[in-house]
Image (tube, rainbow, N blue to C red):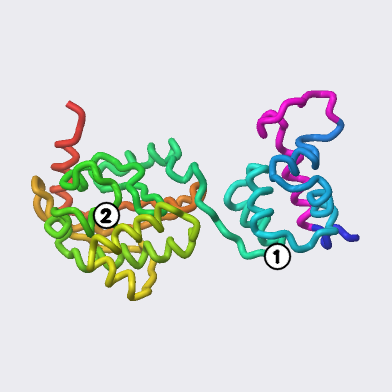
């Protein structure tokens, strides 16, 4: 069988060769091992499949693995999101990027990047649009909402939402359409499904918008804030996907240079600066 006939097997062998047993939580590593990385049997145990099945998969004798098996093998081999997508394609499946337990953790380098926007509101959203991290200006913009960190819940249940968001109908609709898009990307995400169920019950406006079945990403957007301390602030937002944390998005809102909004952000930055 030619190498191009078993690209899946070659990829699996290369991936397991790069993982030391200790990295996978296994004992028994060391110089006495005859193979680099993990053995087939060890990958099978970690993935919860039989050793015979995994061997047939590597050898190209099993051609129809299920998505559940590919998910389990991807986790066992500690593959990145890009590598898991590639594994899916090699297995003849449509790539699915599932939320992981790490999806709520913001990488330290991304936290540093937030502070690199001293005159912009920058924050990171999770798949259910929870604010996972924010710079000082974004924190000041969201201060009227207290401890609540979920943007859809703020928009549809917080008493200050329609005051702070001057164009509330536009922002609310765009948020619901983007949430529906995420629900399609992450159908197993309990935070999204739980939030949808909660807001469907609590908010007639959310219920109506959710029922219209429209979808759309959080792309370039214009937002108007009416801040209790800084007044009216107009920002243009750009959204960036965080590649090493599928489901996370970085949003950066900037004012028009020389505008009153730029002065207002400078005021908020000064107010939030450490004494």
44 drawn magenta: no
Q: Which residues are magenta?
A: 7-33
Q: Residue 164 or 146: which is nearer the viewer?
A: 146
Q: Residue 58 or 231: which is nearer the viewer?
A: 58
Q: Quadrant of the N terminus?
A: bottom right
Q: Secondary structure at mark 1?
A: loop
Q: Which residue is mark 2?
A: 153
Q: Quadrant of residue 229?
A: top left
Which residue appears farthest toward the front when viewing the image? 201
Residue at 82 percent of width and 61 percent of height:
4
Q: Earlier in the sequence, mark 2 or mark 1?
A: 1
Residue at 40 percent of width and 58 percent of height:
193
Horizontal relation, residue 260 to residue 41: left or right: left
Which residue appears farthest toward the right when viewing the image? 1
Q: Which residue is mark 1?
A: 92
Label 2 to label 1: alpha-carbon separation? 39 Å
Indicate which disc residue 266 carries: none
Residue at 49 percent of width and 62 percent of height:
185
């Amino acid at each position: 069988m030619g190498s191009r006939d078993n690209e899946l097997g070659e990829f699996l062998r290369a991936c397991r060769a790069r993982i030391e047993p200790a990295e996978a939580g296994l004992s028994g590593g060391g110089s006495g091992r005859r193979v680099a990385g993990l053995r087939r049997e060890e990958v099978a145990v970690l993935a919860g499949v039989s050793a015979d099945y995994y061997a047939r998969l590597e050898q190209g004798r099993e051609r129809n693995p299920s998505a559940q098996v590919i998910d389990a093998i991807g986790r066992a081999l500690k593959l990145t999101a890009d590598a898991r997508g590639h594994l899916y394609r090699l297995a003849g499946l449509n790539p699915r990027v599932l939320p992981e337990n790490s999806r709520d953790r913001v990488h330290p380098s991304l936290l540093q990047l937030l502070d690199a926007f001293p005159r912009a509101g920058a924050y990171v959203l999770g798949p259910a649009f929870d604010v996972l991290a924010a710079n000082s200006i974004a924190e000041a913009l969201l201060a009227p909402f207290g401890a609540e960190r979920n943007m859809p819940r703020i928009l549809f249940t917080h008493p200050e939402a329609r005051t702070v968001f001057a164009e509330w109908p536009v922002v609310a609709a765009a948020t619901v359409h983007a949430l529906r898009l995420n629900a399609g990307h992450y159908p197993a995400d309990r935070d999204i499904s739980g939030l949808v169920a909660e807001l469907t019950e609590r908010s007639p406006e959310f219920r109506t918008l959710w029922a219209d079945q429209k979808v759309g990403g959080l792309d370039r957007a214009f937002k108007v804030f009416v801040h209790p301390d800084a007044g009216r602030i107009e920002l243009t937002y750009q959204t960036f996907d965080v590649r090493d944390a599928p489901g996370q998005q970085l949003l950066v809102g900037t004012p028009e240079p020389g505008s009153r909004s730029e002065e207002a952000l400078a005021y908020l930055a000064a107010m939030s600066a450490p004494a």
